[in-house]
């Protein structure tokens, strides 16, 4: 139940922020929050996270669905044993679903967080990247712990 609530919180934060931006700003409009450092800039991104890859919307929908299915499968195998993995999967699935909703709803993803030195992104993109980072940390330290355990056994 905590997992579902966590995923829903990520989706709600993502979708509410996107709906607010789309309802209150014109496409391409930018509002400086901290001048030349952080702006809210409304764009629609047909590509991947940070606009890095450009494929058809169908490709991203299929990829998103695969990530969600793999995530659910792995959740039952890995996340129950480790809180870091559990929370990373909340972020990964919530972020994937948040962007997937946009792709179904408008055919692209609404991005608006603009730090001027990085491509414009959104809360779902942030969730995905933080989730991946947490998994990397887990597997780096988990592998080290496993190697230490093997050394102790010898």
Image (cartoon, helix red, strand yellow):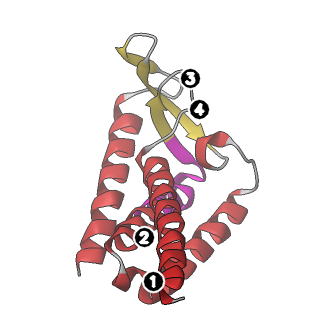
Q: Residue at x 66, y 68 (%)?
A: 63
Cβ atoms at labels 2 and 1 below 8 Å apart: yes
Q: Secondary structure at mark 3?
A: loop
Judging from the image, what secondary structure is the residue with disc 4 in? loop
Query: Which residue is nearer to you in this view: 113 or 71?
Result: 71
Circle 2: is it few (<14), some (14-19), or many (20+) Cα within 10 Å? many
- Which residue is pictured at 73% across the width and 47% down the height? 53
Kindly state the secondary structure of the residue where label 1 is placed: helix
Identify the residue position indicated by label 4 in the image.
119
The residue stretch that appears in magenta? 94-110
Q: Which mark is residue 89?
A: 2
Query: Main SS of the magenta segment?
Result: helix
The reply to whether the magenta stretch includes residue 65 is no
| Marks 4 and 2, the one that precedes in the sequence | 2
The magenta stretch spans residue 104: yes
Q: Earlier in the sequence, mark 4 or mark 1?
A: 1
In the image, which is nearer the foreground, mark 2 or mark 1?
1
């Amino acid at each position: 139940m905590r997992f579902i609530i966590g995923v829903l919180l990520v989706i709600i934060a993502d979708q509410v922020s996107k709906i607010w931006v789309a309802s209150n700003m014109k496409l391409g409009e930018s509002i400086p929050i901290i001048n030349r450092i952080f702006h809210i800039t409304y764009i629609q991104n047909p590509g991947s996270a940070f606009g890095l890859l450009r494929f058809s919307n169908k490709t991203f929908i299929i990829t998103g669905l695969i990530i969600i299915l793999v995530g659910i499968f792995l959740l039952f195998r890995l996340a129950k044993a480790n809180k870091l993995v559990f929370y990373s999967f909340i972020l990964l699935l919530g972020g994937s679903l948040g962007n997937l909703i946009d792709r179904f709803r408008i055919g692209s993803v609404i991005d608006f967080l603009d730090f001027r030195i990085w491509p414009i992104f959104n809360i779902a993109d942030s969730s995905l990247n933080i989730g991946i980072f947490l998994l990397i940390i887990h597997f780096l330290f988990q592998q080290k712990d496993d190697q230490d355990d093997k050394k102790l056994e010898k």
